[in-house]
Image (cartoon, helix red, strand yellow):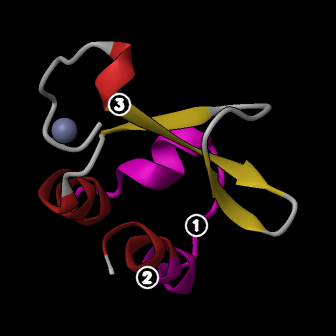
Amino acid sequence: MGCRRRAATARLLRVSRGADGLVVGPGAGRGAWLCAGSARCFDLAVRAGRFPRALRAEVAATELDALRISLFG
Ligand SMILES: [Zn+2]
C-alpha cells in the first residue's frame, strides 16, 4: 500500500480498524497492507492518504502517529 512494491504476504503487515483504533495483525473488516518493518513504506502510505482509502474510514493523524511509534519507535 505504501511503496506499491509487491511482496509475499508473509512479508507484509496488516493494519485494520479495531474498536480502540488501529490494530496490527489479523482482524475483521478491511485491511491495509504495508511492507513489514518499513518505516518508509508506512510514511509513503500516510502521505498519500492511503489509510482512509484502504480502510474506507476516517483515520486520525494521532492514530497514525501512535501506530508509527508502536511499529518503529
Ligand atoms: Zn511497501
Relative image position of residue 67 (x, y in whole percent): 49, 71
Q: Nearer the viewer, residue 13 or 1?
A: 13
- Left or right: where 67 falls relative to 49: right
Q: Which residue is mark 1?
A: 59
Indicate the secondary structure of the residue bearing disc 1: loop
Relative image position of residue 50 (x, y in whole percent): 36, 48
**Label 3 vs label 2, nearer the camera:** 3
Q: Is residue 7 above or below residue 31?
A: above
- Is the residue marked by circle 1 packed among few (<14), some (14-19), or many (20+) residues within 10 Å? some
Residue at the image position 13 percent from the left and 40 percent from the top:
3
Q: Is residue 56 above or below residue 6?
A: below
Q: Which residue is mark 2?
A: 65
Q: Is residue 44 above or below residue 61?
A: above
| Residue 58 among those drawn in magenta | yes
Residue at the image position 74 percent from the left and 35 percent from the top:
27
**Label 1 vs label 2, nearer the camera:** 2
User: Residue 23 lies in what quarter of the image?
Assistant: bottom right
Q: Is residue 56 above or below residue 29?
A: below
